[in-house]
Image (tube, rainbow, N blue to C red):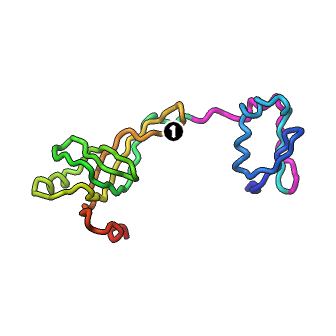
Amino acid sequence: MFPLLLSVTLFQFRATLPLKQLYNFSRPALNADDAIKGLEIYDQDHKRLCKVERESFEYMSLPAPLPESDTRIKPEEAILTIFKVIFEKGYKWQFYYQGNKISATINDESFFDQIDRGAKFSKGDKLIANIEIKQVFDKTIQAYINKEYSVVMIKKRIPRDEQLDIYLK
């Protein structure tokens, strides 16, 4: 295990940095300053862990690996606050989820059976549900972006006038 603090010498400059800040010494950052002739990293006992000459900077970092798939499905348990209801199957309802307004299809047949039997809903009611989030990888920012939501199963409906915390235990 590496120590928490490392001493970094940029062949003329010396600084002691937390380990997580060491990642700021990327290849482009090192190459941008002609005064930097190399990089040495020492542990807290002043023992040299590595030395890299400027000519070897190009081998110090590799491109971030691309994910195996451009899309993925992320399952989650969610608390959805109803904003807009559409009773037809296949249409998207609107919810607030984690402070964001989302649109999602509901794929829970038993839930629609309850609606057909007269279940009542109000704006602000909450649904405890299993959802799936379709995410698409954006290569320009190297991150997955939420693109589509679907409600797989609704576990419970909580009327807006009831306290939510009793259902989360």
Please tell me how many numbered marks the rendered image carries: 1
Point out residue 163 in the picture as x, y percentages from the top left corner. 31, 69
Residues shaded magenta: 45-65
Q: Position of residue 133 (x, y in %)?
A: 37, 45
Quadrant for the N terminus in the image? bottom right
Task: Write the residue at 71% across / 41% down.
Answer: 24
Choose between 148 and 58: the one closer to the eye.
148
Q: Name which quarter of the figure residue 86 lies in.
A: top left
Q: Is any part of residue 158 visible from this angle?
A: no
Check disc 1 and give the amino acid type: Ala
Q: In what quadrant of the picture does the C terminus appear?
A: bottom left
The percent position of residue 147, horizontal first and vertical second, equals 38, 38
Q: Quadrant of residue 142?
A: top right
Residue for point 30% across, 43% down: 103
Element class at badge 1: strand
Give residue 135's position: percent from left, percent from top: 42, 40
* 50 magenta-colored: yes
Is 23 a magenta residue?
no
Is residue 97 found left or right of 65 in the rendered image?
left
Asked whether 60 or 86 is in front, the reply is 86
Q: Is residue 135 visible?
A: yes
Image side of residue 6 versus residue 126, left or right: right
Residue 92 horizontal side relative to residue 11, left or right: left
- Write down the residue under mark 1: 143
Q: Residue at x 82, y 31 (%)?
A: 54
